[in-house]
Image: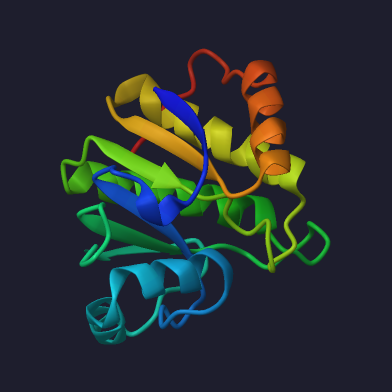
Amino acid sequence: MIHLHLGDITKMETDAIVNAANNSLLGGGGVDGAIHRAAGAELLTECRALKGCRTGEAKITRGYNLQAKYVIHTVGPIWRDGSYDEDNLLANCYHNSLCLAKEYNLSSVAFPSISTGAYGFPKDRAMGIAIKEIELFLQDNTMEVWLVCFDKDTYEQYREKLTEIQTKPGEHYIC
């Protein structure tokens, strides 16, 4: 089931929260910086050992001082103009994060709006990709998936998008 929440992802009481990370996994601004600050120094230490992450891929760490037991780090694409495989790379962020959650037998995961902040991915387009990937996953898997919005505008856009998007029958999600 997909849930929509307006608030701070670092306060979510899900099994995992997803970090919209940069390639180094060593913290940054926005969601990435907030998660690193809330989790504490141990997260940075564990992330150093991971030696980074490529765009579209996902890696998992413990949650340390967070309510969530795990942090799934994924690197979203920087928006250029849509002709640099940005849609596919963003879809991979959701796909690989959900597959990692499944691999760890997690029952709930919370996502931020990946790549729509400093990386400049158009929100409406990113939301469509996120919802489609999550709905495809949920056709064959049971998990509580939260879309966590930091601001009311993003929350309202997601709410509208959730009512208009439906995946096509016959599509399936393979981890």
For this orientation, the residue located farthest to the top is: 169
Q: Is residue 175 visible?
A: no
The quarter of the rendered structure image containing the C terminus is top left
Using residue 28 as the reference point, say whether residue 59 is left or right of it. left
Seen in the picture, residue 151 relative to 131 is either above or below; the reply is below
Using residue 62 as the reference point, say whether residue 25 is left or right of it. right
Measured as percent of width and height from the top left, residue 2 is found at: 45, 26
Q: Residue at the location (52% across, 79% down)?
A: 28
Q: Nearer the viewer, residue 101 or 28?
A: 28
Q: Residue at the location (38% across, 73% down)?
A: 36
Q: Nearer the viewer, residue 77 or 85?
A: 77
Picture quadrant where residue 145 is located: top left
Picture quadrant where residue 124 is located: top right
- In this figure, which colouring scheme has been used for the structure? rainbow
The quarter of the rendered structure image containing the N terminus is top left
Seen in the picture, residue 125 relative to 48 is either above or below; the reply is above
Q: Residue at the location (48% across, 26% down)?
A: 135
Q: Nearer the viewer, residue 112 or 167?
A: 112
Q: Residue at the location (68% across, 27% down)?
A: 161
Q: Is residue 81 visible?
A: yes
Measured as percent of width and height from the top left, residue 78 is found at: 68, 68
Q: Nearer the viewer, residue 5 or 62?
A: 5
Measured as percent of width and height from the top left, residue 142 is found at: 27, 25
Seen in the picture, residue 31 relative to 100 is either above or below; the reply is below
For this orientation, the residue located farthest to the right is: 81
Measured as percent of width and height from the top left, residue 114 is found at: 57, 55
Seen in the picture, residue 170 relative to 83 is either above or below; the reply is above
For this orientation, the residue located farthest to the left is: 105
**Tally of marks:** 0
